[in-house]
Image (cartoon, helix red, strand yellow):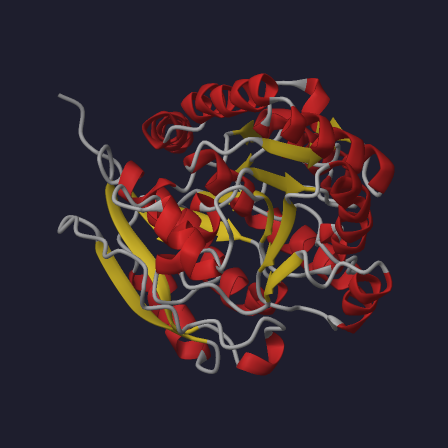
C-alpha cells in the first residue's frame, strides 16, 4: 500500500467567501487520497479592497466534517509575521496554492518562497490567468509569482495557451484539469413550486437566470436587450438577475425602463449566501452566461451544472466546455444571437430536455474524485523529481 502524500493547500475556506466554494469541494475530494493541511485566513484583506463588500461573512456554507483535514486559519493581511510562520511551519511535502486575487500577492509570494527555501515543490491552480477587468499590475504580479512555480493547473485549454503565450511557461509544466461542479449547493428537499411562490413567480412563467456578481464583463446590457426581443416571442418569459453589485446598476436600470421591461425583470442585487443559492437555480428554466470576455471557467456555470440546468453560453474562455450542443454557444456581445437562441430553446421542449440531459454528461467530466486523482498524479510526479 503506497504512503499518502501530505499536501499543504493555500487558499480560502468558509466562512470567508472568496474562492471557498471551489476550495471546499476540492479539499474534501483530495483529502480522500492525500493528507491535507489547509492554510487559510483569519482576515483576508480590508473590505475597501473588495468591491463586492465584506468578504468574510458567509456562515451558511456546510461544514468540513473530515477530521483528517488540518485547517489553519491564521493568516491576516496586516501581519507579515503570520505569513512567514505559516510558510516555514507548514507540514506539506509540497504546496498547492490557489491563485486568483491581486491583493493577496504579498502573502502568496512569502509563503511560496518559504516552500522554495525548504526545497519543496510549489503548484499553482491558476483560476484567473488574466484578470476579469484588465490590469497590467495583476499580470506583472502573476508573472513574478509564477517564477516560484514548479507546475501549474488551469481549467481550460485556452488557459493553457495563455499561460504559454503570456507567461512563457513550457506546456509540459501546465495541466488542464476541469473545475468541478459545485454540488454542495443542491438541496434534495427543495420545493420548486413553493420557492416560486415565495419569489412571486407563477408556475407558467419561463424563468431565465443570469446568476453571479454583477460585473462589466458579464454582459448584463446584452442580456437585457436580448430579453426585450425574447419577451415579444414568449410573453411568459421572465428574466431573473441575481448577484452582488460590483458596479453602478444605474445604466442597466435605465435600459430596463427605456425598453418597458420593469414588470418582467426580477433583480436580487446583493450577495447571495451559499445556503440560499439553490433557491435561484431551482426556480429557473434556463441559465445564461453571455459574458463579453472571460479567460477561465465559471463558478456560476459549474453551479448550474450541479443543478442540471440547460445553459446558453458565449464563446469565450472555458464557457463552451459547459455545453455539448453548439447551438447553445453564442457570439459575445451579440444580443440578437442571444435572443434568437434563448427563444428557440424555450419554445422547443425537446431541445430543452436535450440540453438538460447534456448537463448530466458534462457533470460526469467534472467529478471531484477524478479531479483529485489527476491532481494526485501531478503531486507524485513532482515529488519523484525531487528525489
Q: Is residue 318 left or right of residue 87?
A: right
Work out which quarter of the rendered image holds the C terminus and state it.
top left
| Res 367 quadrant in image | top left
In percent of width and height, residue 289 lies at 66, 42
Asked if residue 340 shows in the view, the reply is yes
- Vertical arrangement, residue 329 with respect to residue 179, above or below: above
Choose between 26 and 240: the one closer to the eye: 240
- Vertical arrangement, residue 50 with respect to residue 149, above or below: below
- Write the residue at 44% across / 26% down: 363
| Res 233 quadrant in image | top right
- Write the residue at 77% across / 52% down: 224
| Res 221 quadrant in image | bottom right
- Vertical arrangement, residue 377 with respect to residue 314, above or below: above
Q: Is residue 44 left or right of residue 3?
A: right
- Write the residue at 48% across / 61% down: 18
- Vertical arrangement, residue 77 with respect to residue 158, above or below: below
Choose between 209 and 93: the one closer to the eye: 209
- Write the residue at 61% across / 27% down: 321
Amino acid at each position: 500500500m503506497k504512503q499518502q502524500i501530505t499536501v499543504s493547500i493555500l487558499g480560502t475556506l468558509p466562512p470567508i467567501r472568496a474562492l471557498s466554494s471551489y476550495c471546499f469541494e476540492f479539499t474534501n475530494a483530495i483529502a480522500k487520497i492525500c493528507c491535507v493541511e489547509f492554510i487559510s485566513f483569519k482576515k483576508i484583506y480590508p473590505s475597501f479592497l473588495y468591491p463586492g463588500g465584506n468578504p468574510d461573512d458567509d456562515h451558511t456554507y456546510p461544514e468540513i466534517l473530515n477530521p483528517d483535514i488540518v485547517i489553519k486559519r491564521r493568516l491576516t493581511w496586516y501581519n507579515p509575521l503570520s505569513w512567514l510562520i505559516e510558510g516555514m511551519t507548514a507540514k506539506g511535502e509540497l504546496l498547492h496554492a490557489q491563485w486568483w486575487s491581486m491583493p493577496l500577492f504579498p502573502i502568496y509570494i512569502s509563503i511560496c518562497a518559504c516552500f522554495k527555501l525548504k526545497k519543496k515543490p510549489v503548484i499553482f491552480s491558476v483560476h484567473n490567468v488574466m484578470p476579469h477587468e484588465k490590469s497590467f499590475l495583476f499580470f506583472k504580479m502573476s508573472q513574478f509569482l509564477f517564477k516560484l512555480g514548479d507546475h501549474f493547473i488551469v481549467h481550460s485549454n485556452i488557459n493553457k495557451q495563455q499561460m504559454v503565450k503570456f507567461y512563457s511557461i513550457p506546456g509540459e509544466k501546465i495541466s488542464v484539469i476541469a473545475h468541478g461542479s459545485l454540488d454542495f449547493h443542491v438541496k434534495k428537499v427543495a420545493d420548486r413550486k413553493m420557492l416560486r411562490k415565495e419569489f412571486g413567480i407563477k408556475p407558467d412563467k419561463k424563468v431565465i437566470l443570469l446568476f453571479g456578481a454583477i460585473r462589466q464583463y458579464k454582459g448584463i446590457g446584452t442580456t437585457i436587450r436580448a430579453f426585450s426581443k425574447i419577451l415579444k416571442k414568449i410573453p411568459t418569459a421572465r428574466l431573473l438577475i441575481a448577484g452582488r453589485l460590483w458596479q453602478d446598476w444605474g445604466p442597466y436600470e435605465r435600459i430596463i425602463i427605456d425598453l418597458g421591461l420593469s414588470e418582467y425583470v426580477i433583480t436580487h442585487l446583493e450577495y447571495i449566501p451559499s445556503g440560499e443559492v439553490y433557491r435561484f437555480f431551482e426556480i429557473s428554466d434556463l441559465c445564461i452566461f453571455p459574458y463579453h470576455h472571460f479567460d477561465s471557467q465559471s463558478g456560476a456555470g459549474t453551479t448550474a451544472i450541479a443543478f442540471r440546468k440547460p445553459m446558453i453560453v458565449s464563446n469565450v474562455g472555458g464557457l463552451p466546455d459547459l455545453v455539448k450542443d453548439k447551438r447553445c454557444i453564442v457570439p459575445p456581445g451579440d444580443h440578437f444571437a442571444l435572443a434568437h437562441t434563448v427563444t428557440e430553446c424555450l419554445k422547443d421542449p425537446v431541445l430543452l430536455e436535450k440540453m438538460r440531459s447534456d448537463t448530466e454528461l458534462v457533470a460526469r467530466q467534472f467529478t471531484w474524485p477524478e479531479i483529485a486523482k489527476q491532481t494526485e498524479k501531478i503531486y507524485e510526479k513532482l515529488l519523484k523529481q525531487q528525489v
